[in-house]
Amino acid sequence: GAVVSQHPSWVICKSGTSVKIECRSLDFQATTMFWYRQFPKQSLMLMATSNEGSKATYEQGVEKDKFLINHASLTLSTLTVTSAHPEDSSFYICSALRPWAGGGEQYFGPGTRLTVT
Amino acid sequence: AQTVTQSQPEMSVQEAETVTLSCTYDTSESDYYLFWYKQPPSRQMILVIRQEAYKQQNATENRFSVNFQKAAKSFSLKISDSQLGDAAMYFCAYRSATDKLIFGTGTRLQVFP
């Protein structure tokens, strides 16, 4: 199956600082990537859809100025959590869409655990 | 709007036995896809099985099979010969032909030896 990587897998940062999470599709080109947030024992919540070369589309209730998404190439999307606060602590998962007939298939990264102190 | 419902927060099964996880969905679309994802303790999302709505035949992948009832908007997952490694969260998901994945709330499966 296709491989999607995320870096870092785990990060701790101080309140008020920014942290960047990278998502890479290693063996296919992804024009579309997705960013999810998952709280303990809950489902994945879609934050935004990232399209290469254009602005991300954010889901309702997600602060686009806090969660900056950049999809600069066909294999890399980044999520920057700006001015992080403890309530931003969560598990963040990216997903890359591999095109095929029928809309494609999403492959997920291993996730990044963010802890804001 | 499309919704996905998993009514079983937790299920348990004895090793080597069979278990069925339930999923229902709501949509007005005719062209869509349904998925079951597994999330083990590592939290890596793993695609278990996929079903295209236009296909009448139920999808199977080794010990995993689905019962797709399009008219009833039901999409259950059957795990046969359960193994300890099957213990995980299982998410049912829906996607229309041109839109994003919508996940259910998940079912935690425990497998007892």
Image: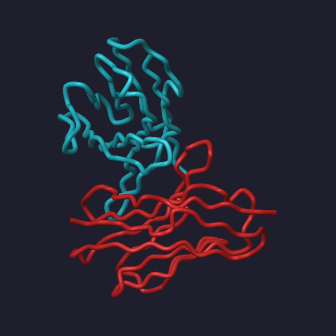
Residue at the far right in the pictured view: B113
Letter of the chain shown red in the rendering:
B
Of A29 and A92, the residue lying toward us? A92
Residue at figure coordinates x 42%, y 86% from the top left: B56
The colour style of the image is by chain
Residue at image location 76% in from the left, 63% down from the top: B112
Residue A18, image x and y in percent?
34, 15
Quarter of the figure that contains the N terminus of chain B: bottom left
Q: For the point 52% across and 49% down, which residue is it? A: B45
Residue B38: quarter of image: bottom right
In depth, the one of A116 and A97 nearer the eye is A116
Up-down relation of residue B69 to residue A53 (above or below): below
Q: Is residue A6 left or right of residue B102?
A: right
Q: How far across and down, in percent of the image, does residue A90 sit?
A: 43, 33
Count how many numbered circles sit on residues in the image. Answer: 0
> Which is nearer the eye, A75 or B46?
B46
Q: Quadrant of residue A82?
A: top left
* In-image side of B42 versus B111 (left or right): left
Vertical position of residue B23 compared to residue A65: above or below: below
Colour of chain A, in one word, is cyan
Give x and y (percent) for residue B97.
28, 65
Q: Quadrant of the C terminus of chain B?
A: bottom right
Q: Residue at x 28, y 28 (%)?
A: A72
Q: Give the image location of residue B94, x and y in percent.
A: 36, 65
